[in-house]
Amino acid sequence: MARLPRLSVPGYPHHVVQRGNNRQPVFLSDADRQFFLGLLRDSAARNAVAVHAYVLMENHFHLLVTPSLGDSLGRFMQALGRAYVRYFNDMHGRTGTLWEGRYRAAVLQAETFLLPCMALLDLNPVRSGLVAHPQDYVWSSHGHYAGMRVDKCLTPHAIVWALGNTPFARESRYCELVQQGVPAQQQTAMVDSALAGWALGSAEFVGRLQQTVPRRLSKASPGRPPRRI
């Protein structure tokens, strides 16, 4: 069966996952991570993509982004991936591919899943046992939203601005949401939808979005389609 084209819908947040080939490390040093973040900022600006959140793990990364144009996400990820592979291979004396095929992405219903997805990214290093608390991990966007630093890579989504009328109120409320954690069912839904390339939201949300997108947005029901009479 032919694989579906990549899902990219302008104006909607996308949860993007890119893994290393055969789960190999894609970041070997802090210098690698710092270089990647510079590419992330520049590629986003050149391709009309707003980066809302990120986390850099050893062998993969997650992004939460909103593309402005239909081809923005693809151009952004291509520029980011190719430039980083050139750097990584030169820096570490290697050749060949670095990524596990093409990136994976899901469109999210912002009202329901944007903040949980941000918390999911923030808590990834905690779940992996790298740190005890999300604020201890410097290679995610958590520090920016917790008021610990200013990250020029990031464009906060309107839903984040709505968390409070002052920076302190927004930061406090956001930290509370992260501390509450993400229910296991939501975690599974967000990861699975990104890896499969589906839209994630209510049935009404997916139905409205499907009217504007030519490719299928959700998993087909098993079995043969019903016979038309």
Image (cartoon, rainbow, N blue to C red):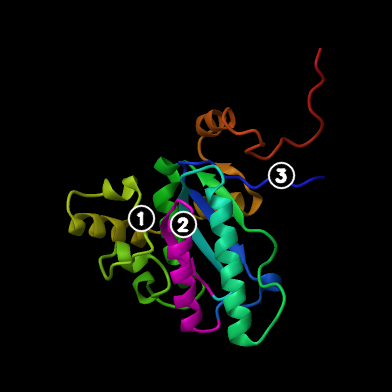
Amino acid type, mark 3: Leu
Most extreme residue toward the top is 229
The residue identified by callout 3 is 4
> Helix or strand or loop: what does disc 2 sit on?
helix
Question: Compared with residue 48, is residue 208 higher up or lower down, i.e. above or below?
Answer: above
**Amino acid under label 1?**
Thr
Task: Measuring from the top left, give residue 110's x and y in whole percent.
Answer: 42, 43
Whether residue 209 sits left or right of residue 102 in the image: it is left
Gap in Å between the C-alphas at discs 3 and 1?
29 Å
Kind of element beneath mark 3:
loop
Instruction: Write the residue at 53% across / 41% down.
Output: 9
The numbered mark, 2 or 3, whose residue comes first in the sequence reads: 3
Q: Which mark is residue 89?
A: none
Give the residue pinned by disc 1.
Answer: 155
Q: Residue furthest front?
A: 46
Quadrant of the image occupied by residue 144: bottom left
Query: Which residue is identified by label 2?
Result: 46
Callout 1: SS: loop
Tell me what residue is drawn at x 70 percent, y 62 percent.
Answer: 101
